[in-house]
Amino acid sequence: MCSLNMKRIILGLTGSFGSGKTTVARIFRSHGAKIIDADKIAHRLIKPRTKIYKKIIDTFGKDILKKNRAIDRDKLARIVFNNKLLLKRLNRIIHPQVIGVIKGEIKTSPEREIILDAPLLIEAGLEKIADKLIVVTITREKQIKRICKKTGLSRPDILKRINAQISQNVKSRFANFIIDNNGTIEETKKQVMAIRRLLWKN
């Protein structure tokens, strides 16, 4: 782990599904941070004709494809979140490639503050390449309401996705900083600024 007051810092940013970490990442971006979004990288890597795309089709079959031959992420999600073994298989296919891209982006990025936005940051072992870890927390009911509003998923489906991740309490044990995202956006911004002041003091 690196010490404070460094010339460059990599901050791991994680939280349970629907905790609002993307909002937190946007706040950091507004202050000049480089955001590396693990989900966006994964989505890019599963596009047709990539190596990961072929591996996923070999594992899960062509029934998960849309008419345009792209992977139907919603259909794939329904499959893996109902079967922990299949979820592990999918993660074993995707995670190593995503981690490789992340390391490459970190190596070539000129920014002094890099935010590694990854919902499965701890599950994938990515906390090892972060200098400090931020965990975004939220109450279960607010979490479910936000996810339902954003995705339209049913409560049982939401709970399956939440329970497939390491719990909020366990993630918080790894944290150097915890952001309580139960309040207003202004309250969240204040917490982000407090973290930045501590990291970049002097």
Image (tube, rainbow, N blue to C red):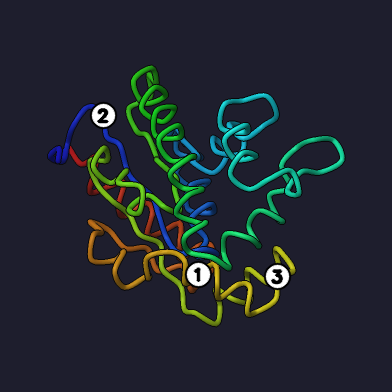
Q: Secondary structure at mark 3?
A: loop
Q: Is residue 186 above or below residue 37?
A: below
x%, y% of residue 101? 44, 27
In-image side of 112 versus 22 (left or right): left
In-image side of 141 versus 180 (left or right): right
Q: Residue at x 41, y 31 (%)?
A: 102
Instruction: Look at the image and tell me in which quarter the N terminus lies.
Output: top left
Residue of label 2: 8
Q: Residue at x 30, y 36 (%)?
A: 10
Which label is found at residue 162? 1
x%, y% of residue 86? 52, 56
Please report contact status of discs 1 and 2: CB closer than 8 Å, yes or no: no
Q: Amino acid at mark 3?
A: Leu
Q: Residue at x 22, y 56 (%)?
A: 176
Spatial separation of the CA atoms under disc 1 and disc 2: 33 Å
Q: Residue at x 47, y 72 (%)?
A: 163
